[in-house]
Structure formats: structure tokens, C-alpha cells
Amino acid sequence: VQLQASGGGLAQAGGSLRLSCAASGGTFSRSSMGWFRQPPGKERQFVAAITWNGGVTDYADSVKGRFTISRDNAVNTVYLQMNSLKPEDTAVYYCASRSDPFSIRKSTAQYNYWGQGTQVTVSS
């Protein structure tokens, strides 16, 4: 499975960005997906996750109400819509997949495949 993240960039505080993660080489519709981020000098942390059909989603407390995860199985892509961005959202964002399609997991160790990361920088 290959995951290609895109859509990062520079935004002002209060602005929006949408990240995309295109999957290939596997069965995307049988995977649950997650977004993680790694701020400078910190460990990678959970942001959001979604089950195979989008029926269940979960978010880190720090992004609830501002970020929305979604997926389109027809084009093998998962999205992260980020609104009301804050400087503390600055990080490299990674998408990840796991072969269990039905459950949400927040630990990096429980994901099988990772994308290369896309940088998000939010200025104050």
C-alpha cells in the first residue's frame, strides 16, 4: 500500500486547509484510516480517524469542532478539512492506514502503512 499526502502549506490563524491522502496498491475500502501530526521537537500524535465507510470517526480533543475527516472510496482518498487553524496546529501531517476496517485506533503502532507527510504551517 502506498499513501501520498498532499495539501499542506502556509495558512494564517483562523484560516483553512484541506489535506488529501491518496491510496494505491491495496484495498482502500477495507481499511480504516487515520491522520497524525508531528509538531517540531515532539512525538507524532493522533489527530483523527475514520472507519471503512465513514460511519465512525474520532478526533483528538485539540481539533474537535475544527477538523473533519472524510473519505471517498470511489477515488481511494481520505481527507482532513482543517478550519479555524491555530499556530499550535503547525506540524508535519501524516496519513496512515490499518487493515482492520471497523475500528478506530489512536496509537501509531496500530497502523500498518504511512504516507510521507505534508507540512502545515500556521502563522499568527
Image (cartoon, rainbow, N blue to C red):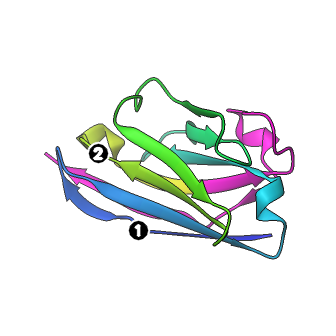
**Where is 73 relative to 52, above or below?**
below
Q: Residue at x 82, y 76 (%)?
A: 25
Point out residue 6 in the picture as x, y percentages from the top left corner. Answer: 48, 70
Residue on which the image places disc 1: 7
Give the amino acid type for the residue marked by disc 1 in the picture.
Answer: Gly
Image quadrant in which you'd find residue 45: top right
Magenta residues, start to end: 95-124
Image quadrant in which you'd find residue 44: top right
**Where is 37 relative to 121, above or below?**
above
Residue 72 counted in the magenta span: no
Residue on which the image places disc 2: 83
Quick one: SS at disc 2? loop
Point out residue 110 in the picture as x, y percentages from the top left corner. Answer: 80, 40
Q: Residue at x 74, y 48 (%)?
A: 52
- On the picture, is 8 further left or further right than 77? left
Q: Are marks 2 and 1 in contact (CB under 8 Å)?
A: no
Instruction: Report the front residue among 39 and 89.
Output: 89
Give the amino acid type for the residue marked by disc 2 in the picture.
Answer: Asn
**Quadrant for the N terminus in the image:** bottom right
- On the picture, is 118 further left or further right than 84? right
Instruction: Report the front residue among 55 and 106.
Output: 55
Label 1 packing within 10 angstroms: few (<14), some (14-19), many (20+): some
Residue extending furthest bottom? Answer: 25
**Alpha carbons under labels 2 and 1: distance apart:** 14 Å
- On the picture, is 86 further left or further right than 109? left
Residue extending furthest top? Answer: 61
Residue 118 counted in the magenta span: yes
Q: Which mark is residue 116?
A: none
